[in-house]
Structures are given as C-alpha cells and as structure tokens.
Amino acid sequence: MAGRWLGYAALYLTMYLIGRLEQLGSTGLAVYWPAAGVSTYWALTARNRSETIYGALLAGVLSLVGAVATGHGWAAGMLFAIAHTVGPLAARAVNARLTRSGSLLGSNIGDDGSVASARMQTVGDVTRLLASAAAAAVASGLVGMLAVAVRGTPITWMEMLAWLVRYSTAIVVVTGPALALRRWHRVVTRPRPVEVVVLATLTAGTLWVVFGPGQALPLSYLMLAVLAWVGFRMPVPWAALWGHLVALSTLVLTLLGAGGAIGAVADPAQRALVLQAYMLLATSLPMLLATAAYERRAHFRDVRVARDRAEQLFTDAPHGLLTLRPDGTILRANDRFGVMVRRSPERLAGLRLDQLSRFGDDLRRHLTRVVDLRGEQQTDDWALDAPDGGTLPVSISSRAVFEYDGVPTVLMHVIDISDQRRFEAQLAHMAEHDALTGLANRRQFDHALQLHLDRCEQFGPHGALLVLDVDHFKEVNDRLGHAVGDQLLASIAAILRRSFRRTDLVARLGGDEFAVLLPDADAQTAEAKAAAVVKLVPDAIAAIDGASPRVTASVGVTTFAGAATRGSDPADLADMLMYDAKDAGRNGYAMLSEIDPDQPLTGARMAWKPRLQRAIDEGLFELHLQPLLDLQSDRIKGAEVLVRLADDHELVPPGRFIYIAERTGLITELDAWVARHAIALLPVIREYNPGFTLGFNVSGSSIGNALVEQAIAEAIADIGGVQPGELVVEMTETAAIQDITQAREFAERAAAMNIEFALDDFGSGYGSFRYLKHMAFEWVKIDGDFVKNAPQSAKDRAIIRSMVTVARDLGKRTVAEWVSSKEALRLVRELGVDVAQGYLIGEPVPIDEFIARHLDGALKH
C-alpha cells in the first residue's frame, strides 16, 4: 500500500515538472498538464471514496509545492493546489452519478464510480470519460482563474477556454489510454503484425509530413484519417495507445519544430489552444471508433450466438415447431413434428399442412384468423392424421410475423395432447364410475335416471328400476375383513354386469347397495331379471376362498308405469320394495304390482311419507333425554336427545321411521325440527345444572344442508348463544364418510358457534381411524355392539382399548354406548373410557322426568 502511494506521488510530481517545461505566455501556465491526467486516473480507479479524497489532497499538496518552487507564490500556489484537488473529485463525482443513473450507455463501472473492475471497452466508457474530464476542467478552472488573477493576469474568455481545453485534454490523453491498457493481457483479439507495421509506417510518415519542421500545409486531417483506420482495425487498447502516441508526437513536433499548420499559428495562446484540441481529438477519436467497432463485433457475436441457440431450440424443442406461409405451406419443421407425422423435416418442406389432416378446414380458419389479427397469438385444438389410421389430438398455437415486404410468416407451436385427452377421459370416467367395481356411480345413475324420467314425461312411462342390497354384508366385513368385503362387491358387480344388456345401466349407489335402470323392460322382463340376480348372488361369496357367511340379495323392483299410477318417485318405491324383500326374509325380491294399488307392505310403507310430513308440520314429535355418566366424577353431566313420534296415541321409536324419512327426502326437515327443539331445552337444563352437555343426532343427508344449519343458528341465537361444551352434534361414522370434505366444512362452520362434534357408532361402518385425524370431532362414541359383549369377548375388549388409546392420543374423549350391565360399566371404566351411556345408566325419558331423576346429585348403583 505504501509503495502504491509513493509511486503515485512520484509519478504526479514528475508529470507536474514535465508540464512546466513549456509555459504559455504571461500566465506562467504549462501548455500541457499531464499531472491532471494522473490525478484523475487515480480518482477513477481508487478502491473507495476515502482513497479518492486522500489522493486528490496529495495532488493538491504536490501542486502547491511545485507552484511555490517554480515561482508562483504562496497565494497563487494555494489556489492552484485547490484547483488540482477539486478537479479529480469532480471527475469522480460525475462518473459515479452517470454510472448510477445509467447515463451515457452501459459500463462495468461500480456504483461508487470506481472503474477498478472495468476497462475502456465501450462507447459509453469513452463518453463518460469525456464528461468526467469536462466536469473536472470546469471545477478546477473556476478556482484556477482566481489563481491567474492573483498573479496579476487579466481573466478573459480566452484564458478560461484555454484552461478548460488544457485540463480536459490532459485527462483524456493520459487517463483514457491508461484505463484501456489496464486489462491489456485480457484482450483476446490481436492485430496482424503486417497491418501493425504498415500502420506504424504510415503514422510516422504522416506525422512528419504534417507536423515536421518546415511543413506549413494545412494537412492535419490526414493524421485523423490514419487514426480512423486505427480505430476501426485495432483492438481498443492498441487504438488508445496509438492515439496517445500521436497526441504526444504532435505536441513534441509542434513545440520543438513549429511545423505544420498548428505551428504556423502566430499567437502562442491560440497555437496552444489548437494544439490541445488536436491532442484531445487524436486520442479520443481512435478510442471512440475502436469501442464502437468492439460493440458492433460483440453485437454480431451475440446475434450469432442467439441465432445458433434459437436454431438449436427449434431443432431440439420437445414439441412440434413450424414456419408456414399464410396458405399453410410448410417452410420448415423441426424433428419433433416430423416424429408426430412419421416424416422427416426435409420431406415436410413444401407440403401444405392441411394435407396431413382430415380436418383441413379447421386449420384454414385458424390460419386466416392468425393473419387477420396481425401478430396476436391464437390457440386452437386440432388433430393430425395418425399413421395407424386414427387421429392425433394436438394443440396449435400460432402467431404471424410480418417481414419488410409485408408478407407474413406464421410461426406455429404444435403440442401433442393425446396424453392429456386420455387423462381427461380417465378423470371423466372416475367422476362417473365407482372405483372399486367399475360400475356407474350414484352421480351417473341419478343423471341417467333424470333423463329417463324426462323421456317418460314426454313419451309416457316405460322401463323398470331395480334396487339391490346385499344381505349379511356387515358380517362379511366384521368376520373376514374389508378386503374380502371389497372382493365380494366386485364379484357381485361382475354378476350384475353379465346379467343385463349394454343398454341397461348398472350402478353401485354406495356401500352394498346397487341399482339397475332398464329403459325398455316391461314388468315381466324386470321380474325375471330380479329373480335371476337373487339366484346368482350367493355364488359370489362361494367363489371367495375361505368365505363362510351366507350372502344373499334383497331386490326391489318397480316399473315406471306402476310408479306413475301411484304418483310416487320410482327410486323411492324401489328402495322401499327392497326393504319389503328384507322384511319378507331376505334372499328374494319384492315387486310393485301395476294393477293392485293396495299392495300390503309397500302400501304401509308409502303411508309413512304423508304421516311423517304431517308430524313435522304439526310438531307431533317428542324429545326424550338419555343420561351420560361421567366416569371420573360419577355424575350425570350430559344427555343425548332422542326423537319419538307421538301419533295416533302411539309413541313410535326412531328405528321405525328414520330410514323412511331418509328415503323419502324428509330427513332434513326432521333434523331441523329436532335441532330447534333440542337447543331450546338448554335454558331449562341450565337452571338445574350449568355447564351440562346436550347432544343430538343429524343424518348424513343433513350434513351441510342449509335448512339444518339455519335451524341450528337461529335456535342458538334465540337462547342467547351457547358456551363451549354445552352443545354436541352427533354424526354417524357412515354419514361422515359419505362426503368427508363436506362433513369437515360443516364441522368447521359449527365450531364458530361453539358447537362440538361427536363421531357416533364408531366402528360400525367402514370405519377408519383416519377420520379422527381429518375431522374436527371432540367426542368418539364407541358402537354398542363392541360394548355389550366386551365382558365375555377378549376381541371386543382389545378393540375398545385401541379406540380409547387412539382417541386419547388425539385429544378426544370417548363415550361407551349400550352399557346395560354392571360388568360392562366396570370394564369400560377400567379401559379408560370417559363417559358411559346405556340402560344401566338410564333409559330415554321426557325432560321433566329426566330432571327429576338425574339432576339431583350423584348416581347411586
């Protein structure tokens, strides 16, 4: 570091003394100030601002010493020192400003104005140097003129102009070449030796002819012509050095030999001004031309590289690329498009693209629209003829590019979308088919049924409908596992598929329930098909190795004509007839008679619909409460609300009408009624036991139903809101898995009203512990089928223990249902169950009786 500063000081002082060799008139100022170029070079290449400031101050101190030593006096010397200090600082400041603002083209110069990491290689670098030189000259000249005045010389515009030209010339002549030569070893391009020798000879000869002693012809422009040649042909460092040497040679020849047009100028001040301007031009001209040539070569190199890359991208693109005339004639095709049509790109050139497809009209319309919209991208689906005789679906995206002659060229991107089409077809199939059996799902069946009903309304009722339910399917799942159950369902699906025509629609509605739509069948055909299916279903379980449970089918059959005579929904009728078949002993079918409107079982079942509707409208239901025993405190802290139908002097349990309400579409109205009246019991319960928990059930059809949610929200608002833990909505596991997403969203909305959720009858359906993870349940009600036999069954005890463990680890509480003996109560307490429910604890009773029995303290056993 010290050596660098000493070298800078020595060089500056040397240049200062060299500049003093020739003075200009009475001012005592040098004709050429190379020291200004040295200090400016230091300022521009300094590593930081501090180094710049210290370097400028050092230049000022050395200038003061030199000025005093050469007879300028302390006052003038001090002003000269200040002038040589502010000059480099002004150059650095302007350079930094132009760099940050992006002015004067681009550069590698740093944000602080330093060019330590750059070299003089672009036109922007040269123009920025010229701007910095001008700024330094103006800043130093304002102070320098004061120094001239102190020396007693009058200040004129000529004096000011002389200072500006002299100072900026020194910077350009010294700093420019020095910057260009800083990265000399990194220059890749080298001039040819022969050309260097020729140019050197020509330069020396021209200098002597133009500026040699005794030469007076105004031929200075000849040297500029030589320098222009140098600028166009030489690398930037060579051109900068060449201009620098020509400038110094011109200076020496003019000062010593007084030759040439410049030496012939009589006035010393004017001669110095012309000389300095010529030196500035001689240095900057080859640098500007060389940097322009460098940028031009770099531009063409970039264009060539970009063109090569574009060529490579065109050739290797993973999709088809084409250039076309507006009429569809192929100008060029890439390899990928050739693979699509099984032809080489060379053979495709000259063909019309519409010759490769049977859908040529679509292509012509596409190309017309592309050309008419002048440059806007257009995308369409199309199809190419496949080699196997089929079609290859593609997506074409095109844009018209207009050349100078106005004739457009169409650029087309061709993407093979056959995989996408297959995937979309698979998604469509999955959306309308059951994943396990491959049959149509409920969505497709409901849609087809509605279309058939529309045709029946237009052309008269025709066709038949079968609904089939697998008997004893739960036993298969429980004893042999769900894998065997799935295998059984797939086997039954295969039987159904073989038993019906392709024009008939066979669907799995869910679980173990199937349906068949026979659009053209009469009553006799439908009955024969039902009988055949009932006969074949037992073979499905027999084909499964190791399967022992007896599996049969119960089928409900109705014709659309028969449903029309009763004014009933065919699906509801078939469903109820299926239950008639179950009630009749299963393994059979029940068919609606088209001539007997008073068919016994179905007539009784159909009578339930108006009976239930009247009960809902007139409020003919009662709510009973069954107590829940907290096994930690041994106190009744909650109850489940259960509905009873009080009609015709009969108290009907829910098992006789809930499933009918579900199948007749009345279940949501019933659930809404239960929700409103159950929540209305909370203020009564609070008077006896604040914090008491009240729960009620909702069916799968009511989950997310707007009517039920509105009833819950309005009932809660009527009682002034509920506290967390006061209200629990119970949802069966099978209801939750019908649409787990809808159930989760329903639970999330209810949680905002401080409602908790219980998963009822857990383990009774297609149970999986993952529902405890993905659903916002706070309570898990263990199905009573596991509890009732747990004292005698080690398997049931193990299942209960695992349920309790998983629920506790997930932060959920458990309720054991069907606790009907002291042994069962003792067992669930030992297994860690939180709450017990069952006839041992208490049967469902009306609200008044419940309060009298259970809200007066601890339960005694």
Image (tube, helix red, strand yellow):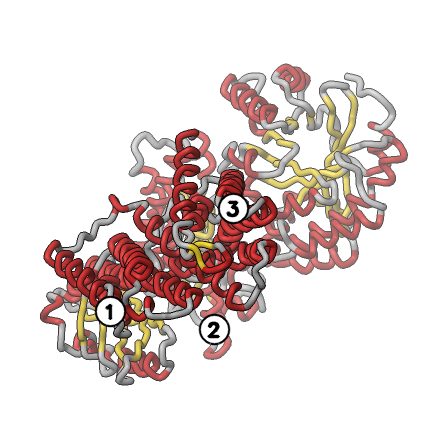
Viewer-proximal residue among 379 and 584: 379
Q: Name the residue under label 2.
A: 461
Position of the N terminus by quadrant = top left
Q: Indicate the secondary structure of the residue bearing disc 1.
A: loop
Res 588 seen here? no
Q: What element carries label 2?
A: loop
**Residue corresponding to mark 3:** 71
Image disc number at residue 215: 1
Q: Nearer the viewer, mark 2 or mark 1?
A: 1
Tell me residue 637's x, y (percent): 78, 28
Comparing 269 with 113, the one in front is 269
Whole-percent x, y for residue 556 in the image = 47, 55
Q: Sequence-wise, which precedes: disc 3 or disc 1? A: 3
**Residue plotted at (35% across, 40% down):** 487
Q: Is residue 642 depicted above or below 170 in this figure?
A: above
User: Residue at (13%, 77%) from the top-left corner?
Assistant: 350
Element marked by disc 3: loop
Question: On the rendered image, what quadrant is the C terminus found in?
Answer: top right
Residue 829 circle label: none
- Identify the amino acid type marked 3: Gly
Residue 154 visible in the picture:
yes
Please, is residue 196 above or below residue 860 in the view? below
